[in-house]
Amino acid sequence: MNSECSEPTADTAGRLADGGSTDLATELFVAHRNLLFTVAYELLGSAADAEDVLQETWLRWVGVDLATVREQRAYLVRITTRQALGRLRTLGRRKESYVGSWLPEPLLTTPDVAEDVELADSVSTAMLLVLETLTPTERAVFVLREVFDLGYDEIAEAVDKSPATVRQIAHRARAHVAARRPRGTVSPAETRDALDAFRRAVETG
């Protein structure tokens, strides 16, 4: 049985008994929205695609029988991860036929929003470029494990793999990222200058 589906908590059961299923689903989704957005953004490198994934996650979440869900956060992360993986594979096929350079979409936020969205060092453009070198599953496992510290069992549910396989994928992904991780600290201005220079070089040959 799915470890995330079991007897609901007393609070959840009580509110469902009162007929507040949709209201409760909305409340739970909003409570975890920042986390879900960050998961989707780190996997996709695009705020617009991350928002689309959240819409898809919401549509599936409101169709779930909440009375069977024990770990709402884990269940939502699983839905988001699977939706993001599907979109990531589609985007990968598009990038293969894309003419020109592809760069992640910088996440533009105010400081207060950045704090709310749990942005970490791994959300930098440089790190997103490093994550681009991983396969979709490696990227998902790395983000869920290294950024959000999810357990291997929980990640296994999200990516539809066994915990033992997830451990191997995590080890491989960490090695890839460590070999490619940017060295030293780079300021946002230096990053923008480097990206602008890279774009000009590509455009002019």
Image: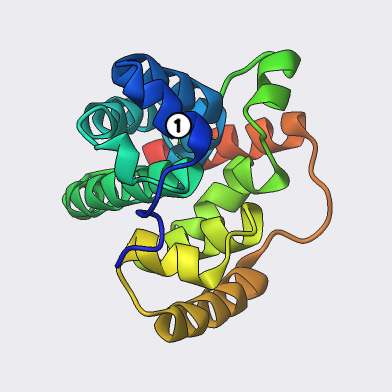
Q: Which residue shows up at 19% across the image and 49% down it?
A: 90
- Locate residue 144 relative to residue 113 in the image: left or right: left
Residue 26 sits above or below residue 58 on the image: above
Per the image, the residue denoted by label 1 is: 12
Q: Which residue shows up at 60% across the image and 79% down it?
A: 175
Quadrant for the N terminus in the image: bottom left
Residue 200 sits above or below residue 79 on the image: above
Q: Which residue shows up at 60% across the image and 69% down it?
A: 177
Q: Residue most toward the right?
A: 184
> In front: 68, or 180?
68
Q: Amino acid at mark 1?
A: Thr
Q: Position of residue 137 (x, y in %)?
A: 36, 66
Residue 142 sits above or below residue 101 on the image: below
Residue 112 in which image quadrant: top right
Residue 103 sits above or below residue 50 on the image: below
- Locate residue 104 relative to residue 195 in the image: left or right: left
- Locate residue 16 relative to residue 147 in the image: left or right: left
The answer to whether residue 194 shows anywhere in this view is: yes
Q: Position of residue 40 (x, y in %)?
A: 43, 40
Q: Which residue shows up at 33% across the image and 31% down it?
A: 49
> In front: 12, or 107?
12
